[in-house]
Amino acid sequence: MTPSGRLRVGMIGLGTVGAQVAARLLERRAELSRRAGLELSLARVLVRDLHRPRAITMAEGLLTTEPAEVLDDPAIDVVVEVAGGEEPARSYLARAICNGKHVVTANKLVMAKHGLQLLELAGRRNVDVYFEAAVGGGIPLISTFRVDLAANYLSRIMAVINGTTNFVLGQMARGRTLAEAVAEAQAAGFAEADPTEDLEAHDAVYKLAIMASIGFGAHVRPEAIYREGIGRVDPVDFPYARELGYEVKLLAYAAQDEQGRVEARVHPVLLPLGHLLGNLEGAANAVYVEGDLVGPVLLQGEGAGGRPTASSVVGDLVDLARSCHRQVQRRPAIEFRSELVMLPMDLVETRAYFRCVLADRPGMLGAMFTVFGQEGVNIAGAMQKETEGDTAEFVVTTHPASDLALRRVRERIAAEEPDIAVRSFIRII
Ligand SMILES: NC(=O)c1ccc[n+]([C@@H]2O[C@H](COP(=O)([O-])OP(=O)(O)OC[C@H]3O[C@@H](n4cnc5c(N)ncnc54)[C@H](OP(=O)(O)O)[C@@H]3O)[C@@H](O)[C@H]2O)c1
């Protein structure tokens, strides 16, 4: 129990997520406190601008622009960080921990890049770090990995975890160009004014780094994850994909083998129509996990938005309050294996889809297939559409090959065959 018999919450941020967290804490205080076993009270909220119009009206004196009033005040027991960005969020979290406060954060960037250091610091200060909201908005992922799946050896995590790209690819499947689809996503509130982090898959990489680290018990750094955004996906690929029995998704994929080698990558994929992750529309997220005891598990829900994300943040607060009430100092530490070996992308085995444009004359196909053959890439299927003019479009799918061999096919065609162009290359799951 905290000395006061209460858990006094200091928040950093009162934007999309923060306003919903505050609303829930203020409007359902009695009910949440009963569930928590001690009184949960919102004591102070740090913002940048006191005069900005807010989605929630706060009592006089609750807002501050002075970080010390949240981070250094001994009357605050837990700091909820819903501000975002790397700095000063990381330093604020570290300072709160050093001051003996528990922290709850929705910040995937900070947790993916600095989570291990914050967890170690929290271990030394005997406080806890909660970060359910950092991955998958309202979908209960971290607690599921940490508690419910703890008995399992997890072999694979596959996720459609970025709502913006899922929405954009869905619109492209309906015939829009990338630019049109992004504009529609922005108009519908599914994309930021600057959508680079999402389109170039940084966001999905941060989320995968956190999930793979917790799920595999191995520290997977974001820099070690292969990343490719959706910028090179062409609307032309969607009808081809559908004809071949696939749809196009941005997939976050992590796997570990019995030797402890971990593969982690985020890139566009062709996913079989009817796959559990394939039917997601718009901003929905889903995570598919395979455990040796439990088998396959699918977790699906709203991966973003103020209310779903507040569900995770406030859930963390109630969990924390319960352990304070039981006088359990903090949850068991997250243990990471040290023998982790990241498999380089070149060694990853994958199937692939190539869309090539060839000069429409004899010998071109033979030349193209020779390159595939010389690189040891076995062709699974091929399809040619009749075209007008002097070029032909040819689609090739391959059997599994190393990513290095698949890259060499592309590089060699570009270097050696001036009349053949590889217009699209998408890996197949
Ligand atoms: N929005 C979502 O759907 C979603 C989903 C999952 C996770 N998250 C994560 O949740 C966090 C918050 O996202 P959001 O969408 O709520 O952001 P937001 O709407 O931009 O709100 C950010 C809030 O933080 C405050 N803030 C920013 N920098 C600050 C600083 N240096 N000092 C004090 N206050 C500061 C801002 O204050 P002012 O209002 O005074 O400017 C604002 O109230 C991010 O880490 C994000 O990745 C968001």
Image: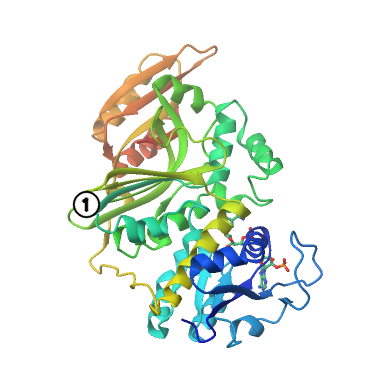
279 relative position to 189: left or right: left
Q: Circle 1 — which element? A: loop
Percent position of residue 42, x then y: 63, 73
In the picture of the structure, the residue carrying the numbered disc 1 is: 257
Tell me which amino acid carries mark 1: Asp
Percent position of residue 124, x then y: 38, 84
Colour pattern of the rendering: rainbow
130 shown above or below 304: below
Q: Residue at x 29, y 30 (%)?
A: 372
Percent position of residue 112, x then y: 45, 64
Q: Residue at x 49, y 52 (%)?
A: 136
Q: Nearer the viewer, residue 219 or 412?
A: 219
180 relative position to 421: left or right: right
Q: Residue at x 51, y 54 (%)?
A: 202
Percent position of residue 354, x then y: 40, 30
Q: How many marks?
A: 1
Q: Residue at x 28, y 26 (%)?
A: 379
Disc 1 crowd, CA 10 A, few/some/many (<14, 14-19, 20+): few
236 relative position to 128: left or right: right
Judge whether residue 357 can be spotted in this image: no
229 shown above or below 409: below
Mark 1 beta carbon near ligand 1 (under 8 Å): no
Q: Nearer the viewer, residue 32 or 394?
A: 32
399 relative position to 391: left or right: left
Q: Quadrant of ligand 1?
A: bottom right
246 shown above or below 233: above
Q: Nearer the viewer, residue 60 or 180?
A: 60
Judge whether residue 192 can be spotted in this image: yes
**Where does the C terminus fall, quadrant-wise?**
top left
